Image (cartoon, helix red, strand yellow):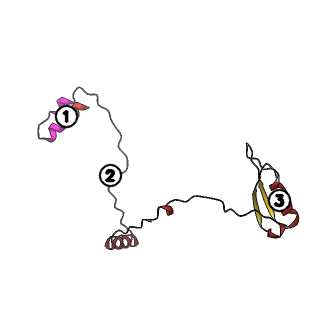
Amino acid sequence: EFILDKISDLWQSGLEINWPHLQSQKAKHKISLPTYPFEKIKYPLGKGMRELLTKALSNGIQNNKNEQISDWFYELSWKQSRLISSLGEISEGLNYLVFCDTCGIAKGLVERILVNKNASAVLVIIGADFVQIS
């Protein structure tokens, strides 16, 4: 392959190559060509795309970079609220997500929510696996 590359470079430079002699010892193989024609098909841009590109190029490229680096990223976080101190603060019909502690305070709070205010609560307990209890 290296030699053929160099020979083709010489041929491009104008040197006459005896091609039949060069390929006389080589085995010949037939290859099949695709059945479709080698035609170049041009797909014109739609009218709307052409207008959009023309307008963008005439106005120049605008820099839409946000300069505030704090706005480049988004960090998902829970909205924290203070601990409910009395049942009077519990709103009826709301859903509560309560992360449990190991002391049992959260379980007592959830029981009070469910019994007295007709609200729903989901209790999240620390564990080794994900298990939905009810």
Residue at 17% across, 29% down? 21
Compare residues 23 and 85 and report the one nearer the observer.
85
Residue at 76% across, 57% down? 98
Instruction: Name the spot of residue 126 as percent of width and height, x first.
Output: 74, 47
Residue at 35% across, 68% down? 61
Q: Earlier in the sequence, mark 3 or mark 1?
A: 1
Q: Give amino acid for label 1.
A: Lys
Q: Residue furthest right?
A: 115
- Mark 2 closeness class: few <14, some 14–19, many ≥20 residues within 10 Å: few
Say which residue label 3 marks: 109
Query: Is residue 16 shown in magenta?
Result: yes
Instruction: Name the spot of residue 44 as percent of width and height, x first.
Output: 35, 66
Residue at 76% across, 47% down? 131
Q: Residue furthest top?
A: 25
Q: Give amino acid for label 2.
A: Phe
User: What's the CA distance linking mark 3 and mark 1?
Assistant: 85 Å
- Mark 3 closeness class: few <14, some 14–19, many ≥20 residues within 10 Å: some
Q: Which residues are magenta?
A: 6-32
Q: Quadrant of residue 19?
A: top left
Q: Earlier in the sequence, mark 2 or mark 3?
A: 2
Query: Is residue 87 shown in magenta?
Result: no
Instruction: Name the spot of residue 83 as percent of width and height, x first.
Output: 75, 62
User: What's the CA distance linking mark 2 and mark 3?
Assistant: 76 Å
Say what secondary structure mark 2 lies in. Answer: loop
User: What's the CA distance linking mark 1 and mark 2?
Assistant: 29 Å
Report the mark closest to the observer, 2 or 3.
3
Say which residue label 1 marks: 6
Q: Residue furthest left?
A: 15
Say what secondary structure mark 3 lies in. Answer: helix
Say which residue label 2 marks: 38
Report the mark closest to the observer, 1 or 2.
1
Q: Can residue 41 be seen in the rendering of this structure?
A: yes
